[in-house]
Amino acid sequence: MVFQPKLFQTLRHYTREQFTSDLLAGIIVGIVALPLAIAFGIASGVSPEKGLYTAIVAGFIISFLGGSRVQIGGPTGAFIVIVYGVVQQYGLTGLAVATVMAGFLLMAMGFLKLGTIIKFIPYPVVVGFTSGIALTIFSQQIKDLFGLQIADMPADFIQKWTVYAGHFATLNPWAFGVGVLSIALIALTPKVSKRVPGSLVAIVVMTVAVYFLREKLGIQGIETIGDRFAIDPSLPRLEAPAVTFAEIQELLPTAFTIAMLGAIESLLSATVADGVTGDKHNSNTELIAQGVANVVTPFFGGIPATGAIARTMTNINNGGRTPVAGLVHAVVLLLILLFLGDLTRHIPMACLAGVLVVVSYNMSEWRNFKALFRNSKSDVAVLLATFVLTVLFDLTIAIEIGLLLAVVLFIKRVSEVSSVSVFKREVRGVEYVEGSVDTEKLTVPEGIEVYEIEGPFFFGIANKFEEVMKRVGDRPRVRIIRMRKVPFVDSTGAHNLESLIRSSQKENVRILLSGVNEHVRKTLEKTGIADLVGSENVCSNINEAMERAVAMNNAMPR
């Protein structure tokens, strides 16, 4: 079955001891998720509670229906750039429509069993746009980190830094101090205790400190969430976004980008979790769950969600081993929102900026980015193209161009290793066996030519055959096409092969096929090439083909 949620599998043999571990892990992850959900919501251009709504609704659905035992879902840094851009251009309604469409695309990927295929997206593309997103997130935090007084912040990367440079004189030392101390606390906390999340420590300590500075010492220059947003500490209300067909058409590329990001992020997180727990997730079920979460969450005011690596690892490190921990995490966030939500208005914006600076640093993968420069020039080109497009233009364009470049370069590489050779005097006779050495030689009589194709016979190399024939320029009586090293033939290769056979037959040149494997033979039978050349002329090896070619050659009039 494609859809097999892990929750129902784990509950068959669930124990009280496991519930205790899941309960503790869920409570801790819920507390950890609180500042991240708020920070991701604000950075995405929406209000803080919408980040919490996403963590609650999507987190619950992903754990309830997901294909991983330990995956924790919610808003993540990967979506900040794309969500912010959609909100600025299309508003919250446009974001809701794009998120719902992305959810349906994710569900379709899962039902079509594309979960494993998503994993084959080229590594330079993933690192390129992840590093680009990290740099963009970092650049968005400069205003709050330094407490700069900027009324209108441009979205463009270069313009943003130009504005920063022009307003740096408005730096607020109190806000900058809060931001720097927040980053320091996040960095130092793991050295004291790896169980307590540094972001939570920074939020609590700096919120208390800023409250004291504002209320007791009268220092009012430090902006908090409550100064910028009116937080609604209540249950999310069900609202259906108004949508038109024109909006669907316009937002489809954005929805595709959200779906691809969600698929990559969630499956990467689940794979990392498998490496730690020894379990194996169901990638197709996970995609379906991610899809359902993104379809439902916008109706409750949420933003795009996916699997979150940091929260998933926190879950694992604190004993969570079933989806129950993820369900508990969502309930804990809901209780915090309802009963402690009003306290979030005291959190300083500079502290949240510090949290996101650390998030962007962890996302940057600068070590992997640097290491990729030791790879081939084509990998570096894909990496830099994706990175630059993500930072300077648009994430949708970056992913599309990055994937296109990767595909083109892959085809180029395969074409370079595939070849067509012609033999007129002698040819190796032994069929290839792993570890063997071709030593036997067969003499090629006059009037017979042997063409050998090595590698996939697909659209990237199909024209090479015709080029080699034109270069040779001869017209033999019998032409053997040796295909022992051809793993597959695509439609273009089959079409070119059919054209070659027909043109050869018009010139009274007989065609024999040699060493055709079972997979390629089925393709030739389906396309009618086997019938065209004659099934008796599709030989299992070169020795058989040569004997038949000699008999044909001798029987033909001189």
Image: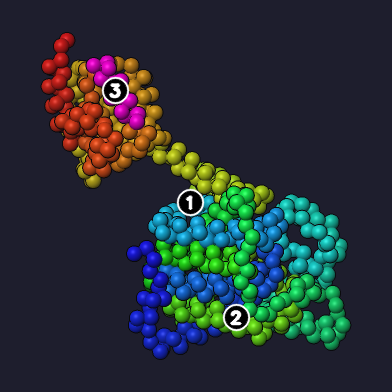
Q: Write the residue at 66% across / 49% down.
A: 393
Q: Residue at x 38, y 69 (%)?
A: 4
The amino acid type, in three-letter code, at marker 3 is Arg
Label 3, label 2: how far apart the Cα atoms are: 71 Å
Q: Please name the predominant secondary structure of the magenta segment in the image.
A: helix
Q: Check the image and report above or below for 408 versus 451.
A: below
**In this picture, residue 73 sits left or right of residue 547:** right
Q: Which is nearer the N-term, disc 3 or disc 1?
A: 1
Extent of the magenta region? 495-508
Q: Which residue is mark 3?
A: 502
Q: Pointer 3: residues within 10 angstroms few (<14), some, or many (20+)?
A: some
Q: Is residue 183 visible?
A: no
The reply to whether dot 1 and dot 2 touch (C-beta < 8 Å) is no
| Of 372 and 45, the residue lying toward us | 45
Nearer mark to the viewer, of 1 and 2: 2
Residue 334 is labelled as: 2
Task: Please name the residue shown 57% across and 55% down the image.
Answer: 255
What colour scheme does the image use? rainbow
> Residue 148, position in %: x, y?
81, 65
The residue wearing badge 1 is: 122
Q: Residue 13 lies in what quarter of the image?
A: bottom left
Residue 357 placed where, x, y %? 67, 67
Residue type at tag 1: Pro
In three-dimensional space, the C-alpha distance between marks 1 and 2, rounded to whole angstroms, equals 38 Å
Residue 111 shown in magenta: no
Q: Secondary structure at mark 2?
A: helix
- Numbered circle sitting on residue 313: none
Q: Sequence-wise, which precedes: disc 1 or disc 2?
A: 1
Mark 2 or mark 3, which is nearer the start of the sequence?
Answer: 2
* Residues at circles 3 and 1 in contact by the CB criterion of under 8 Å: no
